Amino acid sequence: MLTRRRSLALLAAATSGALVSGRARALEAFDFSPEQPGRVRAARDEEAIRLIAKDAPFAQDGVFTVANNGGRFPFGGYANDTKTIIGSEPDIAQLVADALGRKLEIVPVSWSDWPLGVISGKYDAVISNVTVTEQRKEKFDFSTYRKDLLGFYVRKDNPIVIREPRDVAGLRVIVSAGTNQEQILLRWNDQNVKAGLKPVEFQYHDDDVVLYLSIESGRADAYLGPNALLGFKAAQEGKTRLAGNFSGGWPVLAEIAVTTRKGAGLAEAITHAINTQIKNGHYAQALARWNLSAEAIAESRTNPPGLPRT
């Protein structure tokens, strides 16, 4: 009798040979070297520098010290030297550091540790896919730089299009338990059931191999998750495609921001620096390096309205 672990091993082995050559070709499109020769750089922005508060406390002289979770690409991960953090968020950090006339230092931290590190002044900022919320605004200032988008991904040859709650009625959807996207999908499902539509069949997988095999084999119709992460994987492997996306704060807009200590006097300068990079096109170039769409770009704002407290 096959155990679940044995079944997973057989499934992975059966597909690994076919995936290796395709992955190798796809990975060539992304630079995982620690040197990052293609990283987009910014010119010194004197107006942004003038906006830095005179008593702004930087962690190090002449340095912009940025915390990054380094969890998953494209946001941040380890280069092929296994110690240098690279990705789209370090690229954004580089643009801001350049504009502020400072050297960049990226510090890998666990997700649970960045708040205390920023509050204590150990880090000047965290740039690691942090969403603006009203609760976080009690302790932090924000300079937004990207829309928080979720995406439905399906098998490449699946014609499904998902634009509104009724489009998921009757579908078999993979989602991670306890996530924001699960809560949104649950609300969509409740709305559909009340309207007399078929319910969603929720699927939960802890193993990414099984998850993607479920999509590729047709045992699941779609996978709902952070659009940037799933889009990066789609670009790497060419086996899935975007069927539709929407705000991670649905039904309200959610935004990702550079996060600094409240009252540190850095947010206005960072916001100005980001808007300069948006206007001159450098920001879009930085996103494109990691397969992030320019559709995610929005004018940077300092401390915009956040999501409701949860």
Image: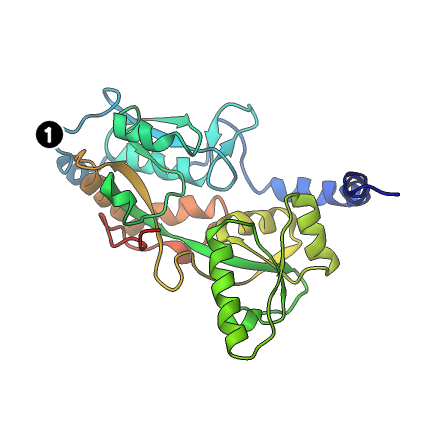
Residue at horizontal 19%, vertical 26%?
A: 57
Residue most extreme to the right: 1
Residue at horizontal 54%, vertical 74%?
A: 193
Residue most extreme to the left: 54
Picture mark count: 1
Residue 152 pos. (x, y %): 55, 60
Q: Nearer the viewer, residue 225 or 243?
A: 225
Q: Is residue 67 above or below residue 180?
A: above
Residue at horizontal 61%, vertical 69%?
A: 160
Split into 4 quadrants, where in the image is the N terminus?
A: top right
Say left or right for 58 vs 29. left
- Place residue 247 in its image quadrant: bottom left
- Tell me, yes or no, if residue 36 can be seen here: no
Q: Is residue 170 above or below residue 113?
A: below
Say left or right for 307 vs 261. right
- Place residue 253 in its image quadrant: bottom left
Residue 138 pos. (x, y %): 23, 42
Residue type of the residue flagged with mark 1: Lys
Residue 79 pos. (x, y %): 53, 29
Q: Identify residue for label 1.
A: 54
Assess disc 1: are there few (<14), some (14-19) or many (≥20) residues with their C-alpha within 10 Å of its C-alpha: few
Residue most extreme to the top: 61
Residue 199 pos. (x, y %): 59, 70
Q: Secondary structure at mark 1?
A: loop
Q: Is residue 184 above or below residue 9?
A: below
Residue most extreme to the bottom: 196
Residue at horizontal 32%, vertical 45%?
A: 257
